[in-house]
Amino acid sequence: MDQEKEAHMHALLAEPVLARLGTTNPETLQPHVVPVWFLWDGSTIWISAFVSTRKVRDLMKNLRCAVLVEPKLPADGLQAVLLEGQAELISEPASLVAEMSARIYTKYLGPEGVLAAEPQSWIHDPENRLVKLTPARRMAW
């Protein structure tokens, strides 16, 4: 990926736009795509997700996934970023799960909004996990 496209990719991934996480259940081979909030740290995408959700149940059986991010309005010739690879499901340490979840929610809710009761309960819920994807393949177009 050239430097200009790389810079546009990082700029898009910093925006509070929805991503779409794609997983597949290896038993049924049925794909599942769901919108998610995320945080990009420059090399890894982080998603907060609950154990009871289908995306996490799929990832518990098959860690391979894809994340698609599109700008609200295509700009600078960049229409989408696709990240693919094998994720990690992180449950410990609980302090890391809480810290990264708070950073994800702050991106979308702001520093005041993240202090509300509901995002705080999500952050500290024992069912909360982190999906960590350091992509093996990155594409932008």
Image (cartoon, grey):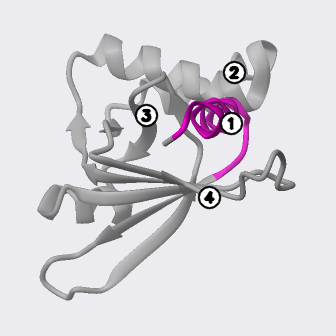
Q: Distance between the residues labelled 2 and 4?
A: 32 Å
- Residue 73, x across and y down, in percent: 87, 55
The answer to which of marks 2 and 4 sits earlier in the sequence is: 2
The answer to which of marks 1 and 2 sits earlier in the sequence is: 1
The answer to which of marks 3 and 2 sits earlier in the sequence is: 3
> As displayed, is residue 15 above or below residue 94?
below
| Amino acid on which the number 1 mark rests in the picture | His
Q: Residue 141 carries which label?
A: 4
Q: Residue 8 carries which label?
A: 1
Left or right position of 136 against 54: left
| Marks 1,4: beta carbons within 8 A | no
Secondary structure mainly formed by the magenta segment:
helix
| Amino acid on which the number 4 mark rests in the picture | Trp
**Pointer 2 residue:** 114
Q: Which of 75 and 135 is in front in this view?
A: 75
> As displayed, is residue 53 above or below residue 86?
below
The answer to which of marks 3 and 1 sits earlier in the sequence is: 1
Left or right position of 33 against 107: left
What residue is rendered at 55% in x and 20% in y? Answer: 102
